[in-house]
Amino acid sequence: MTTPNCAGATHVADLLIQPVVLSGGSGTRLWPLSREKYPKQLLPLIGDDSLLQATVRRTEGIAGATLSAPMVVCNEEYRFVIAEQLRLLGKPGTIVLEPVGRNTAPALTLAALAATRDGADPVLLVMPADHVITDTAAFRAVVAQGAGLADRGFVVTFGITPETPETGYGYIQAGAALDTKQLGSANAKLITRFVEKPDLETAKSYLEQGSYLWNSGIFVLRASVWLSAIGACRADILAACNTAWEGGKRDGEFMRVDADAFSACPSDSIDYAVMERITAQSREAAQGSSPLPRGLVIPLQAGWSDVGAWDALWQVLPKDDAGNVTQGDVMLHDCRDTLALSDGRLVACVGVTNLVVVETADAILVAHKDRTQDVKKIVDSLKQRGRPEGKIHRKVFRPWGWYDGVDAGARFQVKRIVVKPGGTLSLQMHHHRAEHWIVVSGTARVTRGEETFLVSENESTFIPLGTTHRLENPGRVALEMIEVQSGSYLGEDDIVRFEDVYGR
């Protein structure tokens, strides 16, 4: 439980906090680095950690609190990459899989059901996976403050102190503070209302009034409080999630819910489903005549950004004396306020101002920094035309490793394949293509029809069309090989799987 100290701040005494990371965004405005099949939260945009890893790492060291292993709610398509990223952090946790996206309210409901499955009732620290916070000490301090309030039944969110009249964020209007003796916090205030992304003039008026904060989408609340609130506000969401959870099962490190039941769940956000209704009934809640908890907002000044577009990334990254940000193999001459990123090839810019230049293996973006919100229109156009650049990278990650599409043409395709030690591809067959495998380094164990044999460095083997086959790495070092495919159809859907250790 929590007690107020003599300074009026809330002290967290061995409070159990369950970090919950909601990893459902696609980040289309950060194309071409962010793709539908590999969204921005999985990318190391700032530092060596991905945004998801940084989100998990910043929860370490909350004063006086005991942290459970992280819980991530994500689309099942990202499950292996997220599991690997948590493993690299040394923080394997619970990964709850959504068969389809249903927005943040159902995602949080699944997390609360998972957190209470053994009779526990932790305080949930709910965070989007794709945000940046540069001042982790300030973040941990306000989380500790908010967690103490959540322990007492409040639903607490954090509002970012606005610096500009931003039109890309929602806003929270902060109202009056309750008695600080009751709250143990002089900074927390009742939420007056949530407002959607405003136009510029409205945003300017919000900034002038001083009572409006940017909506961070970060919450702390008890799991039981959320389940009670979502039941009171959206009983249909709670019922669908309960059915999906009860019909689910554990699959190794993953928690799977019933796909049909969850697909039938209505889609809604935390704000629309619950928070706006809490705000509308705050007076009744204060008088004890409402079943809903009271909502509070605490200002947060911690270098927050949702990194929603390239200009936002430019804002948070370190710059040279001319305001330029560079990553990778980049050369600039007489440039100002420009963001230039290279994923491999040399990028050279001369005499440009306020540009964004992003290079990847299969696409290059050039945009004015003031127009980066429109990058989504390019992604929409790519999807309408059926082009793969809107969905996947040339380099594709799999649970056993990854492959890179090096070259392709009529009736042929060349891939570089890397298999992790102990990695195993599925036992499979192709109807329309044959494959030639050349081992560059490491050792491959190959199953081809009824035979199994080893292929070492500088050796090769051939897999005829229609032949059942499997590739494994039995060694302790990565297996690297070149695969040359030939045939009438080379799509990834020409795979018939007979066995797969990863359950695909």
Image: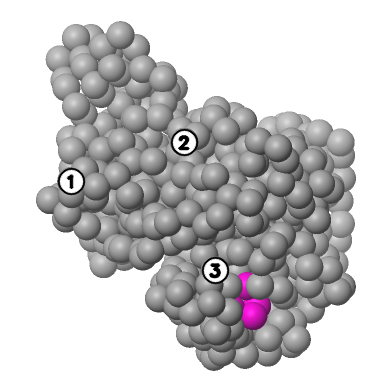
Q: Which mark sits nearer the N-terminus, 3 or 2?
A: 3
Coloring scheme of the render? one colour
Q: Nearer the viewer, residue 293 or 468?
A: 293
In the displayed structure image, the side of residue 120 where residue 177 appears, left or right: left
- Residue where numbered disc 3 is placed: 294
Above or below 318: residue 30: below
What residue do we see at 33% from left, 51% from top?
Answer: 212
Q: Which mark sits nearer the N-terminus, 2 or 1?
A: 1
Q: Report crowding for label 1: few under 14, some 14 to 19, many 20 or more residues within 10 A (C-alpha).
A: some
Above or below 212: residue 155: below
What residue do we see at 35% from left, 57% from top?
Answer: 173
Q: Percent from the top left, x then y, of residue 405?
A: 49, 46
Task: Answer whether residue 266 is visible to the viewer in this image.
Answer: yes
Residue 204 is tagged as: 1
What residue do we see at 55% from left, 84% from top?
Answer: 289
Q: Please tell me in which quadrant of the rendered image residue 77 appears.
A: bottom right
Residue 21 is tagged as: none
Q: Label 2: state its secondary structure.
A: loop
Q: Percent from the top left, x then y, of residue 177?
A: 48, 54
Say which amino acid is labelled 3: Arg
Q: Nearer the viewer, residue 233 or 305?
A: 233
Region rendered in magenta: 226-230
Say which amino acid is labelled 1: Lys
Q: Percent from the top left, x then y, of residue 449?
A: 79, 66
Q: Which mark sits nearer the N-terminus, 3 or 1?
A: 1
Q: Label 3: state its secondary structure.
A: loop
What residue do we see at 45% from left, 74% from top?
Answer: 283
Name the mark nearer the viewer: 3 or 1. 3
Q: Report crowding for label 3: few under 14, some 14 to 19, many 20 or more residues within 10 A (C-alpha).
A: many
